[in-house]
Image: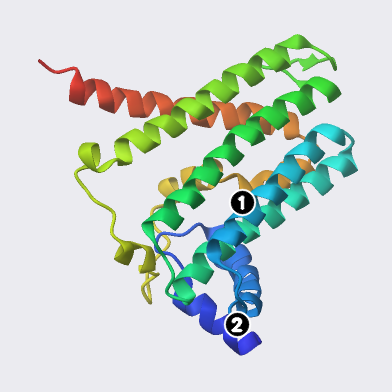
């Protein structure tokens, strides 16, 4: 089992992957792939499982507003993310990768992003916490819900922007199935520190558990909104420069 898992890890790692994935999540996912590879379980079924588990984690964020409840909810979200790694690794290991499967995976990731900001908004509304002005807002403060509506709008807009700029008509690049099999090259470095740090901040599975341990899920709620707002502003600046010229 461990020998197969090591082979899975070597053969299915993605290029330009997150540090958290490289050293934590993909080794765990490789063990799961080693178990699933001989079975008839498909990558798309694992993608669906990942979404179902994520929904359970989002519901837990809202339902269990205590410190321990937050830890349990984030643990469930991390399990969901593990399956999110498993589906692609299983597809690459069994040579089943496809454009449709990749798009389906990305579609479920979009749903998760919207669910996360919505669940965090309702959680902070129920429990109270850090407000946008730096002061503590009481539980039941409607400003949390208003921020949640704004956050969902920002996240959904950022997702739409990503889909638009990645479309072949705009990007000029047509994704091929071969691209889904590109793995890390031996001896490849991690990359510039600034880029790595920004990708780390934008990758919630890498550090959401830290915010849960620190009992500052309210602070992460604002960080998640801010990161999506910055991404959206940067993207729209590029669109204005490209499409706004005479």
Q: Which residue is identified by label 2? A: 38
Q: Position of residue 106 (x, y in %)?
A: 48, 47
Q: Is residue 114 above or below residue 4?
A: above
Q: Is residue 161 visible?
A: yes
Quadrant where the image shows the N terminus: bottom right
Q: Quadrant of residue 158?
A: top left
Q: Can residue 134 be seen in the rendering of this structure?
A: no
Residue 79, image x, y percentages: 71, 57
177 relative to 109 in the view: left or right: left
Q: Residue at x 63, y 75 (%)?
A: 36
Which of marks 2 and 1 precedes in the sequence? 2
Q: Estimate the x, y position of residue 6 in percent, counting from the top left.
A: 57, 82
Q: Nearer the viewer, mark 1 or mark 2?
A: 2
> Looking at this rendering, what residue extends furthest in the top direction?
142
Which residue of the protein is positioned furthest toward the left in this rendering? 246
**At which x and y percent is residue 40?**
60, 75
Q: Mark 2 and mark 1 in contact (Cβ < 8 Å)?
A: no
Task: Report crowding for label 2: few under 14, some 14 to 19, many 20 or more residues within 10 A (C-alpha).
Answer: few
| 74 lies above or below 227 | below
Residue 20 shows which numbered tag? none
Q: Which mark is residue 206?
A: 1
Q: Nearer the viewer, residue 86 or 132?
A: 86
- At 19% from the left edge and 26% from the top edge, which residue is drawn? 242
The C terminus lies in quadrant: top left
């Amino acid at each position: 089992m461990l020998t197969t898992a090591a082979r899975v890890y070597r053969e299915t790692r993605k290029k330009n992957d997150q540090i958290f994935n490289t050293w934590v999540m993909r080794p765990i996912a490789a063990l799961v792939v080693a178990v699933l590879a001989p079975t008839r379980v498909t990558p798309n079924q694992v993608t669906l499982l990942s979404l179902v588990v994520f929904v359970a984690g989002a519901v837990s964020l809202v339902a269990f507003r205590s410190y321990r409840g937050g830890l349990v909810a984030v643990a469930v979200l991390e399990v969901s993310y593990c399956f999110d790694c498993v589906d692609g690794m299983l597809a690459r290991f069994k040579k089943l990768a496809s454009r449709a499967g990749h798009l389906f995976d990305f579609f479920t990731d979009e749903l998760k992003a919207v669910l996360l900001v919505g669940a965090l908004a309702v959680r902070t509304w129920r429990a109270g916490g850090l407000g946008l002005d730096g002061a503590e807002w009481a539980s039941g403060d409607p400003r949390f819900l208003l921020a949640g509506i704004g956050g969902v709008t920002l996240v959904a807009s950022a997702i739409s922007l990503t889909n638009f700029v990645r479309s072949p008509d705009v990007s000029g690049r047509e994704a091929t199935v071969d691209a889904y099999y590109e793995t890390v090259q031996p001896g490849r470095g991690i990359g510039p520190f600034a880029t790595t740090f920004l990708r780390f901040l934008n990758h919630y599975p890498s550090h959401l558990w830290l915010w849960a341990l620190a009992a500052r899920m309210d602070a992460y709620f604002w960080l998640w909104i801010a990161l999506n707002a910055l991404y959206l502003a940067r993207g729209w600046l590029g669109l204005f420069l490209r499409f706004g010229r005479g």
